Amino acid sequence: MANLRDIRNRIDSIENTKQVTRAMKMVAAAKLRRAQEQIFQARPYAYKIGELTNHLKQKLDPTAHPFFQAPEESPGALVIVITADRGLCGSFNSDAIKTAEHLVETSHAEMQADDDLFLLCVGKKGHKHFQKRDYRLVGDYRDVFDGLHFEVAQQIVEDAVEGFERGLWGEVTLVYNEFKNTIVQNQIVEPLLPIPEERFETPVMKEETDGLDLPENGRAIDYIFEPGARDLLDELVPRYLYYQVWRALLESNAAEQGARMVAMDNATSNAEELIEDLTLEYNRARQSAITRELLDITSGAEALEES
């Protein structure tokens, strides 16, 4: 049986770990509240600007804006993968990475073989993973979630648009975790460029827009545009791209905090169970040691009496 001191040391060590995981859970819960407020504020605007852009796109011909169709002779593709800068958040990072790898295997395997596939990784975990596997990485967006701001989304879009206009890639896709609740995150593969013909909807977007009770989710509404549709399109399309990426960043940030809160809660519960098991083992070992001491004392006393 294990030494009493060793068991006591293990109990103290796990107790310290439990305090750390409990504190991390509380920090994640506080960050989650702020992240939820941000995403709940950003979603309606992102949904509406997407609806207006889609409506304008249907009213005009496909050549009305260069972002409506892929440039000619552009053999490559860009995949924007959003992960976290830190771990200790369950399967959050691995889910996003596996989704991106599945996308590459099923849709971009030939581009990857021809070295025409580019990855823009937001977050340290995704960047480190794909860098080790010799993917062609674009930009450096590590350590952005500590002070996440709208300019990050703008810079990501500018990098994506620059390569799109130069013909380095003919399509841009977003891969990220969408926040549904603290337990569930949806893995999303969202087309960004060229702007899809049909408005893209995630599971959460579909639930929320269905609740608005709009005719065909707003597609049947006929708008009167002032100034003209083409002028508005030039203004709306950049905003549309900015806010789709901004929403994806906020979704991922909220999902990360929710996943970390759940992971730390599970770790705290596991630590408590281990402490209970070790305490029981400690008491048994202590009882066994006391019993042996009593037997030694009794045996010694009997030996003295016989002598």
Image (tube, grey):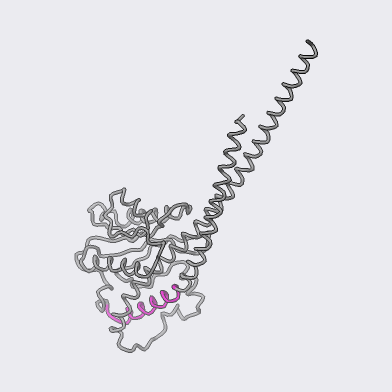
Q: Going by the image, does 84 lie left or right of 299?
A: left
Q: Position of residue 169 (x, y in %)?
A: 24, 63
Question: Which one is in front, 227 or 292?
Answer: 292
Q: Residue furthest right?
A: 305
Residue at coordinates 68% horizontally, 33% vertically from top-left? 284
Is residue 58 highlighted in magenta? Answer: yes
Residue 296: quarter of image: top right
Q: How many marks?
A: 0
Quadrant of the rendering where the N terminus is positioned: top right
Q: Position of residue 273 (x, y in %)?
A: 61, 45
Residue at coordinates 60% horizontally, 36% vertically from top-left? 7
- Which SS type dominates the magenta stretch? helix
Q: Going by the image, does 240 lie left or right of 164?
A: right
Question: Which one is in front, 35 or 251?
Answer: 35
Up-down: is 259 above or below 1? below
Residue 163: quarter of image: bottom left
Q: Going by the image, does 231 lie left or right of 31?
A: left
Q: Going by the image, does 134 lie left or right of 224?
A: left
Bounds of the magenta span?
42-61
Q: Position of residue 292 (x, y in %)?
A: 70, 25
Quadrant of the rendering where the C terminus is positioned: top right
Residue at coordinates 42% horizontally, 76% vertically from top-left? 45
Up-down: is 167 above or below 48? above
Q: Position of residue 105 (x, y in %)?
A: 33, 53
Is residue 148 highlighted in magenta? Answer: no
Up-down: is 221 above or below 140? below
Residue at coordinates 27% horizontally, 59% vertically from top-left? 138
Question: Which one is in front, 57 or 134?
Answer: 134
Residue 43: quarter of image: bottom left
